[in-house]
Amino acid sequence: MRGEREAEAEEEEEEEEGGSHHRPKKLRLSKEQSRLLEESFRQNHTLNPKQKEALAAKLKLRPRQVEVWFQNRRARTKLKQTEMECEYLKRCFGSLTEENRRLQREVEELRALRVAPPTVLSPHSRRPLPASSLTMCPRCERVTASPSAAPAQQPPAPPLGRPPPRPLPRSSARASPPRRVKL
């Protein structure tokens, strides 16, 4: 893309000069011209015709040369941005691929174990209780055998992995009588 634009600019220059079809020397900018062009580019990535004319006069260049320089500079900027995004995406892809492999290994390990679901033992008989006969209190998360599966005289099973809840102090356990409100 850059070469095409430079070639177009050079062809136009040749036509203006009424000259031959040989390629003129490539334009070499001075350090000061490069600095001013870069500074202008930082302020604005595109120039309107008035800005282009003014900058060209300031740099002692033709407006078309300034225009081509800006086109090339935008192309280089876009290319660098694309390269940076590509590197970022490659890193993301690499980390996601590794995470995927790790999870696949974990799944395979779990499949290899083929562990049965955890069982709850009856606190009295120490026999496993069927999972269909268990219920869990949503508030305290205590697991108990449902009344149909366990005899009525058995106390509820202790919670799994949790200590039993503490009893409330006697003072807070007593309910105060409801207040009567006149309407």
Image (spheres, rainbow, N blue to C red):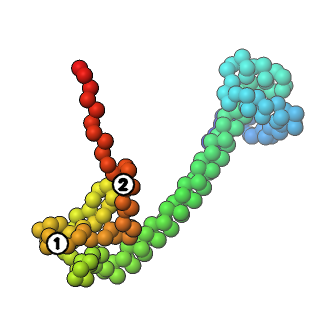
- Badge number at residue 8: none
Residue at image point 32% right, 55% down: 139
Residue at image point 47% right, 71% down: 102
> Hey, what amino acid is under mark 1?
Gln
Q: Earlier in the sequence, mark 2 or mark 1?
A: 1
In the rendered structure, the answer to whether residue 6 lies left or right of residue 182 reads right
Q: Quadrant of residue 177?
A: top left
In percent of width and height, residue 54 lies at: 78, 19
In percent of width and height, residue 76 lies at: 67, 43
Q: Mark 2 to mark 1: distance in Å? A: 26 Å
Nearer the observer, 17 or 37: 37
Residue at image point 38% right, 50% down: 171
Image vertical order of residue 163 relative to residue 2, above or below: below
Categorize mark 2 by other alpha carbons within 10 Å: few (<14), some (14-19), many (20+).
few
Image vertical order of residue 167 relative to residue 71, above or below: below
Image vertical order of residue 105 relative to residue 147, above or below: below
> Hey, what amino acid is under mark 2?
Arg
Image vertical order of residue 46 relative to residue 152, above or below: above
Secondary structure beneath dot 2 equals helix
Q: Is residue 66 visible?
A: no
Residue at image point 27% right, 36% down: 178
Q: Viewer-nearest of labels 2 and 1? A: 2
Q: Is residue 155 visible?
A: yes
Nearer the observer, 35 or 69: 35
- Badge number at residue 153: 1
In percent of width and height, residue 12 lies at: 69, 29
Q: Quadrant of residue 107?
A: bottom left
Q: Quadrant of the C terminus?
A: top left
Q: Quadrant of residue 1?
A: top right
Secondary structure beneath dot 1 equals loop
In percent of width and height, residue 25 lies at: 80, 40
Residue hosting label 2: 170
